[in-house]
Every structure is written in C-alpha cells, then in structure tokens.
Image (cartoon, rainbow, N blue to C red):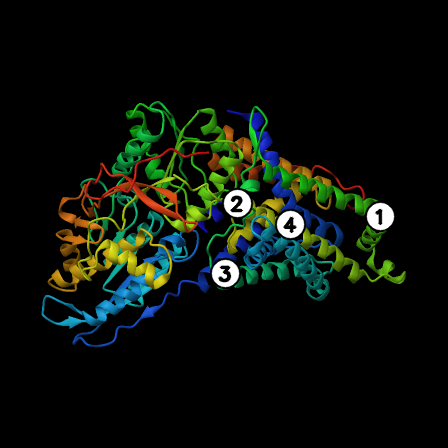
Amino acid sequence: MNLVGAVVDGILTGGVYALFAAGLSYMFGVMRLVNLAHGAFAVVAAYLGLVLSGAFSGLGDPGALLTAAAVTIPVVAAGGYLLQRFVLQSTLSESPLPSLLVTFGLAIIIENVLLVTMSADTRKLSLGRGIETASIDLGFTSIGVFPLVILLLAVVLLGGLSLVMARTQFGRLVRAVSDDPATVGLTGADPRHVYAIAAAIAFGLVAVAGLASGVQTNFSPGSGGMFLIFAFEAVIIGGLGSLWGTLLGAMILGVVQSVTAVALSPGYKELVGHLVFLLFLVFLPNGIIRRKVRL
Amino acid sequence: MAEHSKRRIAAVAALASGALILSGCAGGLGGGGGATESPGGADGEPIKIGYVTPQSGPLAAFGEADAYVIDAMTAFFAEHPVTLADGTTHPIEIISKDTQSDSKTAADVASELILQDEVAMILVSSTPDTTNPVSDTCEANQVLCISSVAPWQAYYFGRGGTPEQGFDYTYHFFWGLEDAEAVYNEIWQATAPADSPVGLLLPNDPDGNAWRDAATGFPPFITGEGRTPVDPGPYENGSADFSAQIDAFKNANANIVVGVPIPPDFTTFWTQAAQKGFHPTTATIAKAILFPSAVEALPEGLGQNLSTEVWWHPTAPFASSLTGESAQELADAFEDATGAQWTQPLGFAEALFEVAAAVLEQSPSLSSDDLAATVAGLQLDTVVGPVDWTSGPVPNVAKTPLVGGQWRSNDAGGYDLVVVANQNAPEIPTGGTPEPIQW
C-alpha cells in the first residue's frame, strides 16, 4: 500500500476536478447562478474538439487537437456570453429556482441532442502517444506528464482568475456588479454586459476542462452528469464563491477518492468521496474557506 | 446508466432527480431499431424474430457487424423461407433492437418485442449485461431466447442457475471461463516469467464478478498455476482513474494483467499504465480489446502484442449452415460490403440465425414449449463451429471452441488479430506465436 503515491495521484485527479469546478464556482460567485448544464457544456466542448480535430487531422498529433482547442475555447466562451445575455439573464432573480430549472432543462436538451447527432458511443481525444503516455519517475511513484500539465493549468487558471478579480479594474467592476448591479448601472456600466463577460470566462474554463478530460479519459453524451457532480462537490467542500477554496476542495475530493481506492477498494472511492462531501454539507456548509469578501 | 445512478447516492436531491429525468429522456429517445419487412414468396404468415444487441454506447463495438448480418439474413430468408414441420413455408421478419449498452433498456426492449411485436423467439448477444436481462424477461414470459457472446458461467450462474436446475425457455452457446483460463495460461507461459504474479482488472459487473469468483473464477486457477493473483478489488465501470490498480500491480511486480473491462475503461487504464511506468510483458484482456476499433483507440503503438481470446476467426475451418459460406468468405463479404475490418461478433450474429432457422424447421410446432424442447436436443455445425446442446457442461448451455490471439500492427496503420495459441482447439490454425509486449 503506497499512501504517499495515492495522495500524489489524488492531487493530480483533483486538478481535473478543479478545472471542472472553476467555471461553476466563478458563475456562482459573480451572479449567484448554479449552472446545472455545466457538465453538459463540458461535453459539448469535448465533442466540438473531436469534430474540429477531425477537420484539422492533416496537422497530425498534437497539432490537430491544439488547433481545435484554439477554436473550441473561444467559440464556447462566446456561446456562454450569448447564453447569459439572452437566456440566463432573464432568469436571475431573488429566487434561485428559475435559473436552476432553465439550466437543468438545457442539460437535458444538450444530452439528447448529442445522443441523436453523435450517438451514445464513448469517444476520446488524441494528443499523440508522446504526450499522453509521457511519465516522470518520482522514486516512490511515477506520474503522468499530461495529468501534471492539467494540474498546473488548473492552478494557473484559478490563481490567475483570482488575481484578476482581486487586483484589476475589470475585477473591481465585476465585484461591484455582483454586489449591487443597480447602483453600478447608475455609473454608466451595463451590468448585463459584465455578467455576460463573466459567463464567457466560465464557459471558456469549462471548455478547457472538457477538452482536458477528453484526452485523459473518455466521454459520451451522458458524461456531463458525473462532471457536474464532482465539480459541484469540489465547490461545496471548498466554499461557495471562493476560487482558491474550489481548488482546495477539488484536491480534497481527489485525495479522498484515491486514498480510499488504495486503502479500502477502488469500488468504494466514489461513495466515500460523496460521503465526505455530505459531511462538509452538514457540518461545514460554508466550506473550508469562508468568504469574507466575495471572490 | 445504472453504474452512474449507484454513484449518485450522496448527491443532493435536485441533482439526483435530475439524473433520473436525464436518463429517462435518453431511454425515450433511443430503443427504436429498424423493423425489416420480408417480401412475400412464402405461403404462411411471417414469423417474427427479435434481435437484441448493444448497437450504441460503450459496448457498441459488439454491434458493429449487426446491420450487415441482418441485411444479409433478410435477403437470404426472402429467397429461402423456412419450412415448418407441417410443410408450410414462412417468410422471416427480423426485428432488431438496440440496448444502448444498458441492461435495463435491454430488458425493456425484450418486453416490447414479446408484448407488442409478439415475436416467436428472441436472439440476444454480447456481454452478460445484455444476455441476462433479456433471457430473464423471456423466461418470465415463456418465450424462447437463444443467446451468445457471454461466458457461460456469467450467463448461467449469474442468472441463478444451478448444475441440476436450469431454465425452461432460455438457451446459450459460447465458451466458458475454463476455456479462457486455458488459453490465457498458454500465452502467459510463453511470454512471462514462470513465477510472475497476475494482476486482476475486474469491474463490479456480472462479467467481473464471475471472473473473480473464489471457487470457479480466475483466482483459484492462477494459484493452481503457481502464481499469485493480485486483486485490488472491484471498481465501477466508467472509472476515470486507475492509479490504485496500477500501483498495486506495480508493487507486486505483476508482469501479467488479466481482465474483463469495458473498452473505454481499458483505454484509460492502459494509457495511465504507460503514464505511471507500469510495463507488463503480457496483457490478456477479454471484452475490451476484442475489436480493431478499440485497439486503434489506444495511443499510437500501445496496442502491439496485446492478447485477447479469439472465439471466431476467418481462418477457422467452419462454414454457415444457411448460406454455405466459409468463415473466410463471410469475413471477406463483410469487409467488401462495409469497408470495415471483420470483427468476431460477425460469426456469432450469423450463427444465432443459423440456430434460429434450424430450430424453426425442426420443431414440431411454433409453441414455445416445442421450440425450447427442440433447442435442447439441437446439434448443428455452424460458422462458429459445432453447437451441441446435448453435451453441454450444464443444462441450457452449449460450448464453442476458443483460442487465443494477439494484435499485430499491419501496413495499413491498423492492427490484425493473429491466432497465437490453439492448444484448446487445435482445429483452428495459428498464424504466429505468442510474443511479449515491447515497451
């Protein structure tokens, strides 16, 4: 039994969860909107990457997928802007129910449209053998280069976004809109535009997550549900609205799962992960990092 | 999928109910297979045969050959209607249903076939997750069901059969774990050190549990061969992370991996094994790498010398009792018509219809009891070899020959399945010898 190795593996798995959770956490932090279609949009991004990398297949691996990603991420982000501006904006109210129902409906529609157009087959994205199977020997365990890249990407994206929110003019604007859209509107800024840009950032993040996960494992039209569950749990464990908390929550979830798999049985890892989430929900509903200021 | 709902136990209620609605919608959309009408030419009413296989979803590769076989059989039966014992001739109408790789959907479409389409019998194949729910539905409705492409232990004991007490309306033909053990052992001996432990990659599903069984599965066989089984425990299908299993195998110095994962899981496992520097010399994997499409889905070159069991191969010296085509001719015709590489279920899809036609022609009547009694005494030489229900290991089961093969890259950039181990069924010729995996 290699507990240290399991912890390392769990942190790497946490990197994927953190990528998935980033967009969910950000949208909740800015506009109090829980996007239940979050996982479904990750799957959409993965399929978009699959179709486009087929179109760019002349570039070979990994050029085809990297080019496809360079197109997919802005396209999904733009989709997020339009969706927020023209659909989700009108669902924002004191009650969380309208946005929950609308995004839930979107998740169902997306899954079924993908089933019809792409079939239920499991698919995978390819970056080429060199990158996908590259390995680093740490002595006590070996880790894959690609999962490590995902983890670093998650840290950079979440950390970068957190800094942008804390330090820049744009970040102050978003926080101001989040606190009091009506007053910000009086100063000349359009809150709807600011919300939509935040949604675009969240959707760009979810596209990165969908593509990264599509390379590391597989996806099918029904994969969105699992993506959403783990992202949701990471956000709750870390503390709603806190980006650093989300990263920490994702790591905790990943480590709990991988240590369970080694110490108990691989069959229990999801269950124990869910139980830990439940414990947080009951005893620490605000998560590890309590939000003093928003974001 | 069922596995998913299991994992959602602790999720918040809104999400859980959402998942239910999501999967409900998915089920509602699919399930519609194409009904193929036979033209006339016979004097009697058409006889309907239901055909249930996974044509989409994680097990879709099993159904790749279905469309071709159904078209070919529809054309064949249009020209050669079956003649019943009373001398009347009848066209055959094949009603095909897709399980979407889901065992609940499989049972649902079987009920539909029985209650709405009123089929005379159901043919079902591809993994116990498909054959078992459909067979159980048929048994409950007293309709004949002939199944294949699932190891017989997972089918028979998995459904609650005992060595004495079998089933009334459900019959099966395929190989068993004892054959897989013999075939895999032949490959292990040729490619791995004699004392190498054996890593078990067995999911928590009917196949995995039958393979893990402490009395009849792989662990006692491995121990009996003087090796140590390394079982990290069952995992759920669709896992995204196999590092626990890989670490356990690596720490035990297992040079051999044996398993029965679903195709996408093996892709994940094998990629992560390479990432984590786990380099076994031998991998005998059932189910997941039966198909060229699954081996090609692995990162480039990682498919070379992976071993799997071979239950049907074009070089086998068998021929179809319906069309007279040899195994090689059937594979060639499939490749010409579809442009795709042949797959093993092709032979068994054909054989299911061979058995169905033989049963209809030999049965004294179309009643389920007469049909079932006919299967129980049926001996037929098919394109997958001799099928004989009078000499099976348990009631309701007939065995077909099994050999072992390895994937070898070909000039076209793909992989060919080459028979490398045939001690278990010497009538099927080898095309090479077992080779260790080169990393």
Kindly indicate whether the residues beneath marks 3 and 1 are on one polypeptide chain: yes
The residue singled out by tag 3 in the image is: A118
In three-dimensional space, the C-alpha distance between marks 2 and 4, rounded to whole angstroms, equals 14 Å
Q: Are marks 2 and 1 in contact (CB under 8 Å)?
A: no
In three-dimensional space, the C-alpha distance between marks 4 and 3, rounded to whole angstroms, equals 20 Å
In three-dimensional space, the C-alpha distance between marks 2 and 3, rounded to whole angstroms, equals 18 Å
The residue singled out by tag 1 in the image is: A168
Q: Does residue B328 show up? A: yes
Q: Amino acid at mark 1?
A: Thr
Asked which secondary structure carries label 3, the reply is helix
- Going by the picture, which residue comes out furthest to the right? A187
Neighbour tally class for label 2: few under 14, some 14-19, many 20 plus, Cα within 10 Å: many
The residue singled out by tag 4 in the image is: A208
Asked which secondary structure carries label 1, the reply is loop
In the figure, residue B359 lies in which quadrant?
bottom left
In three-dimensional space, the C-alpha distance between marks 4 and 1, rounded to whole angstroms, equals 23 Å
Mark found first going from the N terminus, 2 or 4? 4
In the figure, residue B190 lies in which quadrant?
top left
Mark found first going from the N terminus, 4 or 1? 1
Asked which secondary structure carries label 2, the reply is loop
| Nearer mark to the viewer, of 2 and 1 | 2
Q: Position of residue A34 (x, y in %)?
A: 67, 53
Q: Position of residue A132 (x, y in %)?
A: 55, 41
In three-dimensional space, the C-alpha distance between marks 2 and 1, rounded to whole angstroms, equals 36 Å
Instruction: Tell me the chain of label 4.
Output: A
Q: Position of residue B291 (x, y in %)?
A: 37, 49
| Vertical comparison of B297 with B37: above or below | above
Q: Position of residue B234 (x, y in %)?
A: 42, 36
Instruction: Tell me the chain of label 2.
Output: A
Asked which secondary structure carries label 4, the reply is helix
Kindly indicate whether the residues beneath marks 2 and 1 are on one polypeptide chain: yes
| Vertical comparison of B36 with A72: above or below | below
